[in-house]
Image: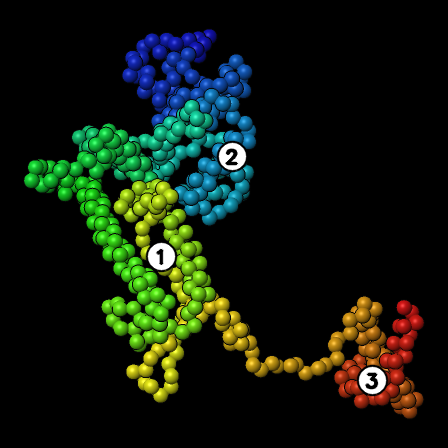
Amino acid sequence: MAPPKEKKTQDRSKELGDSQWLEAHIAGKPANPNAPTIPATEYATAYSCALTDPHLKLFREKDLELLRHVNCSYLSSGKAPTLLALKQHAQALSNLILKLTPQSTFELINGAKFQGAAQFREMEAFDWLRDLGTPYKCDDADQQLPLYAAVNLIKNETETLDGKDGIQYHCPLEPVQDFGPSAPKSDEEKTKARRWPYQTHHNLLIHANECLEILDNDYSATGGLLSILPESDKEDPEQMAGVRNTLIGQWLLYTQLLVARMHELELNLCHALDVLHGEALVPRQLLNNLGAQGRLQGQPVTYPQDRFVLANAGDDVLNQLHKQLDEAEEDASNREQAWRDQGVSGSRMWEKQRSGEETSRGLVSVEATSRFYRIQGQGNKGTIFVMPYVEGHPDLEKTRQAEVRPKVVVVPMPTWPEPGSSMQQRYAAELEEGRKAVKQNRVLLQHWAQNRSQTRQAGPEASMANAESRVPEAQADEMEVDESHSSDETDVVNVEEEMAKRT
């Protein structure tokens, strides 16, 4: 009698060394009887569950060979999977395979058991469904190429204290050993053959952002990232030359120069506002000195104002314009406050009022449509009269209405309205069908009378010919019959009276 199989395996495991046992374990032939039911692969760890217990005899040795690549994170996450989850996982893998490999046929799954059944073509997406009872193998080099684009970029995922998921990505600079048909064959070149599957744009940006956050935190006491730069070319010429040769150095230098330029522009704007602030008070002071008659004279500014004359520009227009300017100033103040909160507005752009409130300094403008007039016959030397704020001028409301009011009104020709009684709308279709029925009956009566008279005169032989041509003649006569017969109107009236009696 042959010894038990387990004893053979145990004796063989003693003979094998550690390296030989590892090779046999990876090859799918465990030499240790305590080894897991399904050994590890190059992509997943070993797998053993209650269903694969040999005492249950639920899976035979051939079945376990078919489950060689069954292990995945769905079965090894510590949470028991459901049948729905396994089907969803299988469907997702099928869709991923379908995206990577074309499929042109739709045949019977596991059709190798049936003779004459249509089977999936080789080298297509679902050729592994031809025979589910045989482990799938393929010697094609294209199917053995590593799919670096499908590598998971997430290294691990943990739950943080605030309840959010902490996702940690792989370092984009982490290399992996290349393998497959495209990898070098010699041992020296294998050590140099590296791939970087985690170097995606998204992963690189995340990695760069983390590095910049660390640097900004370390230099926060001296001003953040901008304080990394050397102070000047004279003190550190070598370091400054090295800064200009790096991307991060060029970026920081550009930002530093941009901030300095913005500071200069803010100073220039503040100086211009200071000048305008003093000049804007000159007309008011002159009016106070001249009195009420001073409004009749033009103000001495850079050029004489005899070319333009303001017309119909009273207090109502002034108040309306000030109202529009107040609204624009309020919006501008809100924007300036938002810019100040974000740190992009200098302190010189703000001034403190007597009430203690700080307001932004600047100019406020609104778009107002004005109208220009000129007397005919004066040419290009005549005076131009300016009427400001035509669209919102209170005194021009009637004029604006007259401008948009049409001068010619088109009156449509009077016609009798369409009847809209519910009774007539309900039975209008039936009345129309009655009119058509009267016409058709009249045509049929005429044909019947003609055929009857012809039959009496010609005898039985002509009756058959008349019967054959009865339908075409009736159709032709129906096309010829129009509303020229006065008797039709009487018949229609009778039908309408009959319909009225019924209702």
Asked where in the image residue 114 lies, by quadrant, the reply is top right
Q: Position of residue 6 (x, y in %)?
A: 43, 11
Q: Which mark is residue 465?
A: 3
Q: Position of residue 250 (x, y in %)?
A: 18, 44
Looking at numbered disc 2 in the image, what kind of residue is underneath it? Gln
Residue drawn at x 42%, y 29% is 165
Local SS, label 2: helix
Across and down, in percent, residue 161 comes to 42, 23
- The foreground one among 173 and 96 is 173
Residue 217 visible? The answer is yes
Mark 3 Cα shell of 10 Å, populated few (<14), some (14-19), many (≥20): few
Structural distance between the alpha carbons of marks 1 and 3: 100 Å
Above or below residue 283? Residue 446 is below
Amino acid on which the number 3 mark rests in the picture: Ala
Q: Earlier in the sequence, mark 1 or mark 3?
A: 1
Position of the C terminus by quadrant:
bottom right
Residue plotted at (43% across, 68% down):
314
Q: Which residue, given by chain and number where applicable, does mark 1 sit on?
A: 364
Q: Quadrant of residue 466?
A: bottom right
Foreground tag (1 vs 3): 1
Residue corresponding to mark 2: 88
**N-terminal label among 2 and 1:** 2
Amino acid type, mark 1: Val
Q: Nearer the viewer, residue 343 or 216?
A: 343
Q: Which colour assignment does the render follow?
A: rainbow
In front here: 441 or 188?
441
Q: Which mark is residue 346?
A: none
Q: Horizontally, is 270 left or right of 426 in the view?
A: left
Q: Does any portion of residue 194 appear in the rendered image?
A: no
Vertical arrangement, residue 332 with respect to residue 452, above or below = above
Find the distance from the CA under tag 3 to the CA under tag 2.
Answer: 76 Å
